[in-house]
Amino acid sequence: MTDIFDTTILCKKCNTKMQSFILNKAGAELRAGKCPKCSDQIIHPADLNSLENFNNIKGKTYNVKLRMVGNSHAISIPKEIVDFIRHQEKMMDDMVKLCFEDMHKLSLSFGRIGISEFDNNEKIEEDKLRNRRRFLDGR
């Protein structure tokens, strides 16, 4: 099946061909079109639907159980979150990163985008630690 954004889209106001671009909103990449004449914009309906689904589950607090699995502990992730992630990330099972951010905060990151964020946060924390050591050493 052909995607609607694979065809030429004309602006309904001035009948000019719209230019495709990617709009970043709330960390999501939305496919969009913009008219070069009147600057009218449209966003792909499937991407809008996905953003709406994200906004519905964002900020919800879930009570989950901590279980023992062998020598490790495990938590269950609610189905609606896993379904959303699976829909967004085709390669969800490739890499999940866990980060102990604060005294009472753990973060999970799914997919490649989050990995670079964790790596960047690790570098920032390493730099902070290195700077503290230099300060304490009197350098």
Image (cartoon, rainbow, N blue to C red):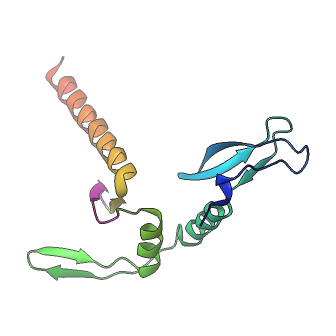
The relative height of residue 41 versus residue 108 in the rendered view (above or below) is: above
Residue at the farthest right position? 13
Residue toward you, 92 or 16: 16
Q: Quadrant of residue 39?
A: top right
Residue 135 place in picture, x, y as percent: 22, 24
Residue at figure coordinates x 76%, y 50% from the top left = 9
Residue 51 place in picture, x, y as percent: 60, 63
**On the picture, is 39 further left or further right than 78?**
right
Residue at figure coordinates x 42%, y 69% from the top left = 86
Locate the C terminus by quadrant.
top left
Residue at figure coordinates x 33%, y 40% from the top left = 120
Q: Is residue 101 magenta?
A: yes
Residue 100 place in picture, x, y as percent: 27, 56
Residue toward you, 16 or 89: 16
The relative height of residue 114 versus residue 58 in the rendered view (above or below) is: above
**On the picture, is 125 further left or further right than 50?**
left
Residue at the farthest top position? 139
Q: Is residue 132 visible?
A: yes
> Which span of residues is magenta-colored?
92-103
Q: Is residue 129 magenta?
A: no
Q: Is residue 26 visible?
A: no
**On the picture, is 63 further left or further right than 7?**
left
**On the picture, is 62 further left or further right than 75?**
right
